[in-house]
Image (cartoon, helix red, strand yellow):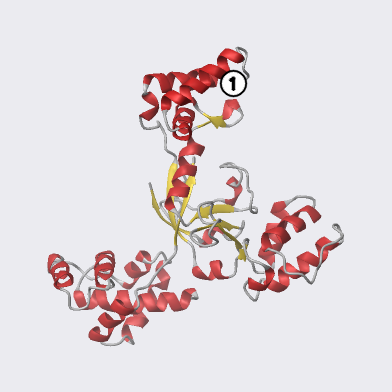
């Protein structure tokens, strides 16, 4: 659904309902979760929740509604207008129970802490920092965000505990946690390290292995890591997602505006790689890979070309979803588009 339609619906439901009930929108959000459940209609639990809210709650302004939705304050006028033409409270409650509004919330794990900006005290994404996180950029050049919170949490923890003086490997504490989890038992992991050191006394990673072994033998590996990095919660606009290149799908299943762009890329790549069928139906990720090679392996150049043609990024299934072909996804936001991704929270 396009963002303006989503925003209008949000204004109708959240703006008017907040006015009717006399409560802030964030409180209304919690109420809506209960009301939108299958058992909410006429259920006494919904009435009890409403009773717990109390009469002192104040109705927020239209700018506050916009803030709660992650929008610039000026767009609060949209909510104000929506409330003026909204249906009756009874109809509104019916809509809330029948069609709960869903927003795609994404997560970004990083070793960095973004500097605050005038537009957002939590900071904003900065394309100049691309490559200073994981650095692999396996599915295009850009800022990576995840639909699954656990994926971003793992990135944050891993990236914040790298030893940059040791080729970016995990430090001893994080390495001990990783090996214990892989082995299923810390003693098995310790045995593997002892075996490696005894067979290769001058092992190139001797210092790291000795430190890892110390954490495993003492049991200190189970203690919380000294730093867990930063986890950012961000709202990825719907209209961006709709226009993204879908890495896992063939050309014929891409968005209508994406298909001709990828076919043109395929034709250009054919000049460098004979045997490619420019009229075929390959997976979009393969097209991106071939075209990046055609452009000298410069993924940043490809990202800028795609962005200039109206494609803001790439979406792909995360590791836990690839086998089934469905589930949660990760997203690559091309440089120049990152300011459209609104940071909502930092942990």
Determine the image quadrant of residue 120: bottom left
Task: Pinpoint residue 189: horizontal percent, then vertical percent.
Answer: 47, 26
Task: Pinpoint residue 304: horizontal percent, then vertical percent.
Answer: 69, 59
Does residue 32 lie above or below 197 as drawn?
Answer: below
Determine the image quadrant of residue 222: top left
Does residue 269 lie above or below 218 as drawn?
Answer: below
**Nearer to the camera, 278 or 117:** 278
Count of numbered tags: 1
**Nearer to the camera, 256 or 165:** 256
Residue drawn at the location 42% of the way across and 29% of the way down:
185
Question: Does residue 287 appear left or right of residue 48 in this picture?
Answer: right
Mark 1 lies on residue: 205
Residue drawn at the location 54% of the way across and 51% of the way down:
319
Task: Pinpoint residue 243: horizontal percent, then vertical percent.
Answer: 59, 69
Q: Residues within 10 Å of mark 1 (few under 14, many from 20)?
A: few
Task: Pinpoint residue 66: horizontal percent, then vertical percent.
Answer: 37, 69
Determine the image quadrant of residue 281: bottom right
Circle 1: element type: loop
Question: Does residue 37 appear left or right of residue 285 in this picture?
Answer: left
Does residue 202 lie above or below 8 as drawn?
Answer: above
């Amino acid at each position: 659904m396009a963002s303006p339609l989503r925003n209008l619906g949000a204004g109708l439901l959240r703006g008017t309902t907040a006015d009717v009930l006399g409560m802030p929108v964030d409180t209304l959000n919690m109420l809506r979760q209960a009301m939108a459940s299958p058992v909410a209609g006429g259920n006494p639990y919904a009435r009890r929740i409403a009773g717990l809210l109390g009469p002192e709650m104040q109705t927020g302004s239209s700018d506050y509604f916009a803030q709660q939705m992650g929008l610039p304050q000026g767009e609060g006028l949209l909510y104000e207008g929506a409330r003026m033409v909204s249906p009756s409270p009874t109809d509104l409650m019916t809509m809330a129970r029948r069609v709960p509004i869903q927003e795609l919330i994404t997560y970004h794990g990083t070793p960095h802490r973004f500097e605050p900006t005038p537009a957002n005290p939590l900071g904003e994404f900065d394309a100049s920092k691309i490559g200073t996180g994981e650095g692999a950029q396996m599915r295009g050049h850009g800022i990576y965000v995840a639909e699954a919170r656990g994926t971003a949490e793992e990135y944050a923890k891993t990236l914040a505990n790298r030893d940059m003086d040791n080729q970016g490997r995990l430090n001893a504490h994080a390495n001990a946690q990783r090996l214990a989890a892989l082995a299923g038992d810390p003693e098995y992991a310790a045995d593997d390290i002892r075996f490696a050191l005894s067979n290769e006394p001058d092992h190139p990673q001797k210092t790291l292995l000795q430190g890892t072994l110390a954490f495993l033998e003492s049991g200190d590996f189970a203690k919380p890591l000294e730093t867990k990095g930063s986890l950012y919660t961000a709202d990825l606009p719907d209209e961006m997602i709709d226009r993204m290149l879908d890495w896992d799908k063939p050309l014929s299943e891409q968005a209508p505006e994406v298909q001709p762009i990828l076919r043109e890329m395929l034709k250009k790549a054919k000049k460098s790689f004979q045997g490619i069928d420019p009229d075929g139906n390959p997976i979009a990720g393969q097209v991106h890979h071939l075209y990046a090679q055609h452009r000298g392996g410069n993924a940043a150049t490809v990202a800028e070309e795609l962005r200039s043609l109206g494609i803001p990024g790439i979406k792909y299934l995360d590791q836990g979803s690839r086998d089934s072909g469905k589930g949660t996804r990760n997203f690559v936001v091309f440089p120049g588009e990152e300011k459209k991704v609104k940071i909502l929270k930092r942990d």
